[in-house]
Image (cartoon, rainbow, N blue to C red):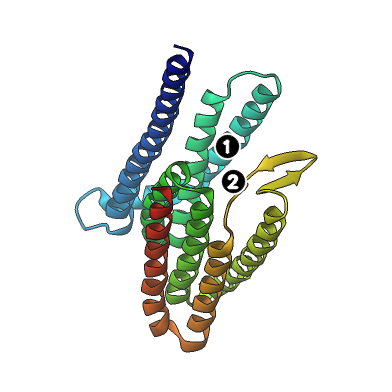
Amino acid sequence: MDKEKRAAEKRAARSHKEDVILNRVLIWFGAAVVVELVLLLLNRYYVNITTTPGEIEFAGALLKAWPAIIGVTAVGTVVCLLWAIFRAKSGKHTTLPGVLFGVFLTALVISVITYRFYGTGVQFLCGAVPAAAVLALVYYLYQHEFFAVTVLSALGLLGLWLFRRAGGTHQPLLYAYLIVLAVILVAAVLLCRSMSTHGGSLTLGGNKLQIFAHNASYGMIYLTCAVVAVAVVAALVLGTSAAYYLIFALVAWLFIMAVYYTVKLM
């Protein structure tokens, strides 16, 4: 009877954990749908405006309102973040301030990128939102090693996309991003080397954080860093035409990794 009871408790705990994961994934995808709808409306009535009465006036009014919107959302983001921190320190639930922080932060990012980069920024956001939802799916359903591989590959894809699209006044942004990408790749290698000798954990501020499983394999993360670095350098050397095909090469690499880690789950 005790064995049956323990088995039932394990099944109940596993079922509860799966329900929590499913709910979180659904929240991410639901939020992504709402944000994508907002972006599509922006793309239609702010970027691709027509001569229909009212559209030009609306776009002009929104252009003038962006600085105020950015200011309000920035203040809201900071206030909600501080609210969440204070509640966390006092041991209270942070659900409401956390949700409001996410809403204000999302609105702030959309406002800044749309105001600064106009149509290109909206196009980038339309691709970034579903990508974020997929990253959440990978984080909750797969091994954390695959999440790291996916993030690194996504950063490489973004670098190649910027290389093809950035020009003129946006060139400094491209080079700044490539420098940041190089730092991230090096940091990923160094952190993985450290975690491989400490059972997948990192120590920050005296606190031990378990990032990966004790038996995690870091080979694919190292290999992904190398693949991303080679793809970006090849694009810089060969030009924008090569970058177009290298994007598909990185997507193919990510697909191979998805198959590999899916098989490991079985």
Identify the residue at horizontal 53%, vertical 63% (top origin).
220
Look at the picture and state if 16 lies above or below 180: above
Q: Secondary structure at mark 1?
A: helix
Identify the residue at horizontal 54%, vertical 38% (top origin).
72
What is the residue that sits farthest to the bottom in this orientation? 238
| Horizontal and vertical percent position of residue 115 | 46, 55
Disc on res. 125: none
In the image: residue 256, left or right of residue 233: left
Q: Nearer the viewer, mark 1 or mark 2?
A: 2
Look at the picture and state if 82 lies above or below 138: above
Mark 2 residue crowding within 10 angstroms, few (<14) / some (14–19) / many (20+)? some
* Marks 1 & 2, CB-CB < 8 Å contact: no
Disc on res. 77: 1
| Horizontal and vertical percent position of residue 230 | 53, 78
What residue would you read off at disc 2? Answer: 213
In the figure, residue 251 lies in which quadrant? bottom left
Foreground residue among 141 and 125: 141
| Horizontal and vertical percent position of residue 81 | 62, 33
Three-letter code, disc 2: Ala
Look at the picture and state if 162 lies above or below 56: below
In the image: residue 130, left or right of residue 96: left
Q: Is any part of residue 188 visible from this angle?
A: yes
Q: What quarter of the picture does the N terminus occupy?
A: top left
Mark sitting earlier along the chain (1/2): 1
| Horizontal and vertical percent position of residue 41 | 29, 47
Mark 1 residue crowding within 10 angstroms, few (<14) / some (14–19) / many (20+)? many
The span from disc 1 to disc 2 (Cα, nearest Å) is: 33 Å
Foreground residue among 8 and 236: 8
Q: Secondary structure at mark 2?
A: loop
